[in-house]
Image (spheres, grey):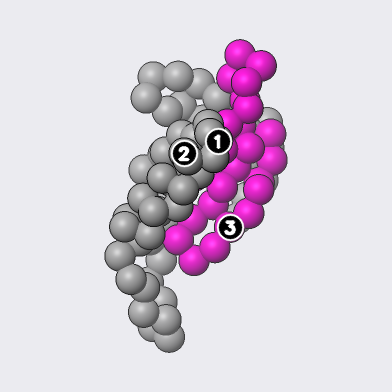
Amino acid sequence: MRDVIGEKADVCGKTYRVIRLLGHGKSGYSYLVTRDRTQYVLKQIHHEPCDYFHFGDKIVAEDYAYNRLLSLDVRMLWLN
């Protein structure tokens, strides 16, 4: 993965600056981003084929995680 710190991410017509990578897994990357002095978590989902691991429905799993974070009042963006 290339270094994206300091780069801009355009989401739904708004521009955010990438502060750092928070983590990654089999389904995507999570970044800490900022806009107008407010920090958000941006989740970038990727689809890599993997012969040795069977994924469930990634979107359902991400939706579950998203709703769980919403219940904790964490601000989030989705970039597909």
- Residue linked to disc 2: 70
Provide the residue span drawn in magenta.
Answer: 19-44
User: In the orientation shown, which residue stands out farthest toward the front?
Assistant: 71
Asked if the magenta segment contains residue 38, the reply would be: yes
Taking the image as shown, residue 13 lies to the left or right of residue 36, namely left
> How many numbered marks does the figure carry?
3
**Against 20, is 62 above or below?**
below
Marks 1/2: CA–CA distance: 6 Å
Do tag 1 and tag 3 residues touch (Cβ < 8 Å)? no
Near mark 3 (Cα within 10 A), the count class, few <14, some 14-19 or many ≥20, is few
Contact, mark 1 vs mark 2 (Cβ under 8 Å): yes
Hey, what amino acid is under mark 2? Leu
Q: Of discs 2 and 3, which sits in the foreground?
A: 2
Where, by quadrant of the figure, is residue 59 drawn? bottom left
What kind of secondary structure does the magenta stretch mostly adopt? strand
Residue 10 appears at what percent x and percent y?
A: 46, 27
* Amino acid beneath label 1: Val
What's the distance in space between the residues labelled 1 and 3, CA to CA?
Answer: 18 Å
Q: Earlier in the sequence, mark 1 or mark 3?
A: 3
Residue 2: x and y in percent read 62, 50
Q: Name the residue type under label 3.
A: His
Tell me, yes or no, if residue 47 can be seen here: yes
Image position of 67 with respect to 7: above or below: below
- Check disc 2 and report its element: helix, strand or loop: helix
Please, what secondary structure does the residue beneath circle 1 have? loop
Residue situated furthest top in the rendering: 36
In the picture of the structure, the residue carrying the numbered disc 3 is: 24
In what quadrant of the picture does the C terminus appear?
top left
